[in-house]
Amino acid sequence: MPKARKSQISLLDTPYYHCVSRCVRRAFLCGEENGKSFEHRRQWVEDRIHILSEVFAIDVCAYAVMSNHTHLVLHVA
């Protein structure tokens, strides 16, 4: 039987989390395809990260927006 999240995660022991999210089917969100640049999407993702960190009251310690995935280091207080 699955354990409840409260019993799996202790915020006192591990307040920092490294989260990774990849695009569906390993598609590329940023970069260049067929001679067209999609680098402007990188700023969309960065803006959304900042907005959501304020809404959910989570500190974003570091982040990296790659071509087809993102890395976030989060601090949950």
Image (spheres, rainbow, N blue to C red):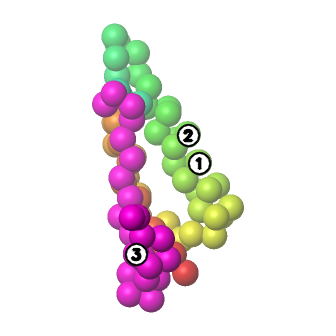
Q: Which residue is mark 3?
A: 8
Coordinates of residue 37 in the picture (x, y in percent): 41, 22
Q: Residue at x 53, y 71 (%)?
A: 59
Q: Residue at x 63, y 70 (%)?
A: 57
Q: Amino acid at mark 2?
A: Trp
Say which element carries label 2: helix
Q: Which residue is mark 2?
A: 44
**Which residue reaches farthest front?**
1
Q: Amino acid at mark 1?
A: Arg
Coordinates of residue 66 in the picture (x, y in percent): 34, 42
56 sits to left or right of 75: right
Q: Which residue is mark 1?
A: 48
68 sits to left or right of 55: left
Looking at the rendered image, the quarter that the N terminus falls into is: bottom left
- 50, above or below 73, in the image: above
The mark that comes first in sequence, 3 or 1, is 3
Residue 19 shown in magenta: yes
Q: Please give the range of residues in magenta.
A: 1-26
* Pointers 2 and 1 in contact (C-beta within 8 Å): yes
Q: Residue at x 34, y 22 (%)?
A: 32
* Pointers 3 and 2 in contact (C-beta within 8 Å): no
* Mark nearer the viewer, 3 or 1: 3
> Label 3 vs label 2: CA separation?
33 Å
- 63, above or below 25, in the image: below
Task: Report crowding for label 2: few under 14, some 14 to 19, many 20 or more residues within 10 A (C-alpha).
Answer: few
Say which element carries label 3: helix
- 45, above or below 11, in the image: above
Q: Residue at x 39, y 35 (%)?
A: 23
* Pointers 3 and 1 in contact (C-beta within 8 Å): no
Task: Point out which mark residue 77 bears.
Answer: none
* Mark nearer the viewer, 3 or 2: 3
